Amino acid sequence: MNEGSSVTHLLGVLRAELARYPEGGKLPSSRALMEEHRVSPVTVSRAIAALVAEGLVVSRPGAGVFRAGARAGQRAQGDVSWQEVALSAGPFTHSAADASGVLATLAVPPAGSIDLVGGYLHPSLQPERALAGALARAGRRPGTWDRPPAEGLAELRAWFARDIAGPDSALGDADVLITAGGQSALTTALRSLVAPGAPVLVESPTYPGTLAVARAAGLRPVPVPVDADGVRTDLLADAFRVTGARAFVCQPLFHNPTGVSLSAERRHEVLRIARAAGAFVVEDDFARRLAHADAPALPRALAADDPDGVVVHVRSLTKATSPSLRVGALTARGPAMDRLRAGQVVDSFFVPRPLQETALELVGSPAWNRHLRALAGALRDRRAAMAEALHRELPALPVRVPHGGYHLWVRLPDGTDEAALAAAALHAGVAVTPGRPYFPAEPSAPHLRLSYISAVSAEQLREGVHRLRQAYDRAAPACRRMDAGGEGSTR
């Protein structure tokens, strides 16, 4: 049983047993709870903290934990129906954010289900010891709790500049803005560089968070199709010409969700086309630190080959470390940086200094490179386990196997109801993501995205694919006919 499920189990037991104690009655000690329920001190501590937060117990340091007094009855519910009119009237309805695609990847699957949805590392893949050490060292730094510069700590900005463009690049710390992770960076970039109501070009399919940010800012996402070599540059040029767009958001490396990387020829074309259109390229480099151990040498970031300030680069430490280390960077040259800095200051002032100091300690320690090497090997092994399981269980479904990122993009037979298949899979005990939210417009075909970083192990990934096959058999009889070599088989 993992730590999270142990806490949930102990919480249920303690809630049920609270009725045995009078108000003010003392609960067993932490040591007694550990021995009785065979759990760790961390599990007991987290369960007690949850009960305190719920107001069910009171913790008195040095004395123990006691059942809280009876809570006052719930306040009468007011009438909030007036908000339907207030939120739907006037010219601001365009700013209502549709976070459904993002929330789907943040949702916690039901207990007992295998998670093939999540976008963050399973705790066993996170550098927890290195993070704890970095946090402790950061806490001892003088000034850690002081206000940081609005653009971020100079040392951290300099590190990101070297990490993004290399030691010999002209990109310097003045060209870097520290952000609260990649999603915050995308928000700042699009809100600062594109006027409300204007078009913004995006890859199709693309990360749902990009679509959510654009629509919440009142922008109109315009899809540009992706193929095996990345974005179709012939269609990109057409899209700039037809729409007059002034920004294009792309993921050139291990694209989410397809896993493809932009070819060398198209890398140059993207920059040429955008420069000719007088437009920005927002480069979301989310997967740079998620390359697998068997990946070939990675291409440089587009920002590293851009002296003219066309590229606004997004990079984050979050994906390769922990969902709670929300530290990222935006790079830009010229007046665009002033826009980005102003946008972030208005929205959030600055990224908390303790997080920045912790990030500095982490990336400056020997543990950082050790973690990246271990992560690269683990991602390779997990990808291989899932790909092999798919080939064995669902051999007729074409799957592109990338050498980076954390997911596989599975093409389903035409006519498959991907939402119904995902629902059937959840009923079978495995959570998967339908492909529809990744498309800015009507999808070209049905897909599933399968993540391999949030499950417990490679063995659990194999079991998850097996459960998906069972759901596929029950929910898609037409697909079974195609498996047997019918017209729809495309492998």
Image (spheres, rainbow, N blue to C red):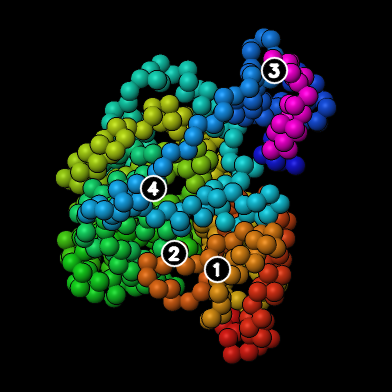
The quadrant of the image that shows the C terminus is: bottom right
Left or right: residue 417 compared with residue 149: right
CA distance separating discs 2 and 4? 33 Å
Judged by depth in the image, the label closer to the viewer, 1 or 2, is 1
Residue 461's spot in the image, x, y percent?
68, 58
Q: Which residue is drawn at 53% across and 65% down?
A: 434
The quadrant of the image that shows the N terminus is: top right
Q: Do the residues labelled 2 and 4 touch (CB within 8 Å)?
A: no
Amino acid marked by disc 4: Ser
Query: N-terminal of the two: label 3 or label 1?
Result: 3
Q: Which residue is drawn at 55% across and 35% down?
A: 367
Range of residues picked out in magenta: 8-28
| Residue found at the very far top of the displayed protein | 62
Q: What residue is pinned by disc 3?
A: 23
* Residue 81: numbered disc: 4
* Residue 419: numbered disc: 1
Please tell me whether residue 145 belongs to the stretch shown in magenta. Answer: no
